Image (cartoon, rainbow, N blue to C red):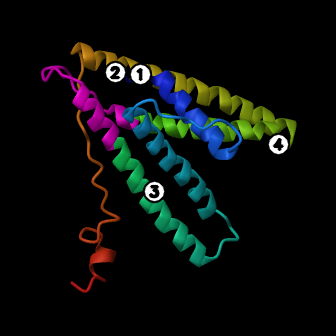
């Protein structure tokens, strides 16, 4: 069920299609794949919203709208990482005595998603500007690919250890406060209730 190279391929295909709709779209072959794609879409949309937020020519009003969208997307991204973990917890008969792993598979998949976006956007830089710029980004691309290879291996190893009873993981809720009108002081002090 969990295969890091398959997840990375889905994320890469989604990213390529998202930037060039003439390329084939990523398709989910399972409900788990769909969760991975939904979570990656949240990161994809978040990446591009954050680019808009950094536009030095954007109006204050535009920045406010983009910032609110970033908050919603980030909440969705975290919710989907939790849903990935819930789906995996439902599949794994974990050994309660096994050592606890500090990072859940859903959070690792989230990091792989971000690396897929960094790799795509760094590759774009290879066709731009000066030879020095291209060389700098070629070096960055080597590092990013190594990081993704390492992280994918960590995910596969964690899942194999969970299935064999050597390690376990928990669902770690993000419990974001900034979108909750009952927890964010700026929101609840303005509320009529």
Q: Do callouts 1 and 4 mark residues in contact (Cβ within 8 Å)?
A: no
Q: Secondary structure at mark 4?
A: loop
Give the SS element for disc 3: helix
- Mark found first going from the N terminus, 1 or 3: 3
CA distance for labels 1 and 3: 27 Å
Give the SS element for disc 1. helix
Q: Earlier in the sequence, mark 1 or mark 4?
A: 4
Determine which of the numbered discs, if any, sits on residue 73 in the image. 3
Vertical placement of 99 versus 138: above or below? above
Closer to us: 38 or 143: 38
Q: Where's residue 100, x and y in %? A: 22, 27
Query: Which residue is identified by label 4?
Result: 128
- Quadrant for residue 22, please give it: top right
The region drawn magenta spans 82-107
Give the residue number, with chain letter if any, for mark 2.
158
Q: Position of residue 138 (x, y in %)?
A: 73, 30
Q: Earlier in the sequence, mark 4 or mark 2?
A: 4
The verdict on residue 99 being magenta is yes
Disc marking residue 154: 1
């Amino acid at each position: 069920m969990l295969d890091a190279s398959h997840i990375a391929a889905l994320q890469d295909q989604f990213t390529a299609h998202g930037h060039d709709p003439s390329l084939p779209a990523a398709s989910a072959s399972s409900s788990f794949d769909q969760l991975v794609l939904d979570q990656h879409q949240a990161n994809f949309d978040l990446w591009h919203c954050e680019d808009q937020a950094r536009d030095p020519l954007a109006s204050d009003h535009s920045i406010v709208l983009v910032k609110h969208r970033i908050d919603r997307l980030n909440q969705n991204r975290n919710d989907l990482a939790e849903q990935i973990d819930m789906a995996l917890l439902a599949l794994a008969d974990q050994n309660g005595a096994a050592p606890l792993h500090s990072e859940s598979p859903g959070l690792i998949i989230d990091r792989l998603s971000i690396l897929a976006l960094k790799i795509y956007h760094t590759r774009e830089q290879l066709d731009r500007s000066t030879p020095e710029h291209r060389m700098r980004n070629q070096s960055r691309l080597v590092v990013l690919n190594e990081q993704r290879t390492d992280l994918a291996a960590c995910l596969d190893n964690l899942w194999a250890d969970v299935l064999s009873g050597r390690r376990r993981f928990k669902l770690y809720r993000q419990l974001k406060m900034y979108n909750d009108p009952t927890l964010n002081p700026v929101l609840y002090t303005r509320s009529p209730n």
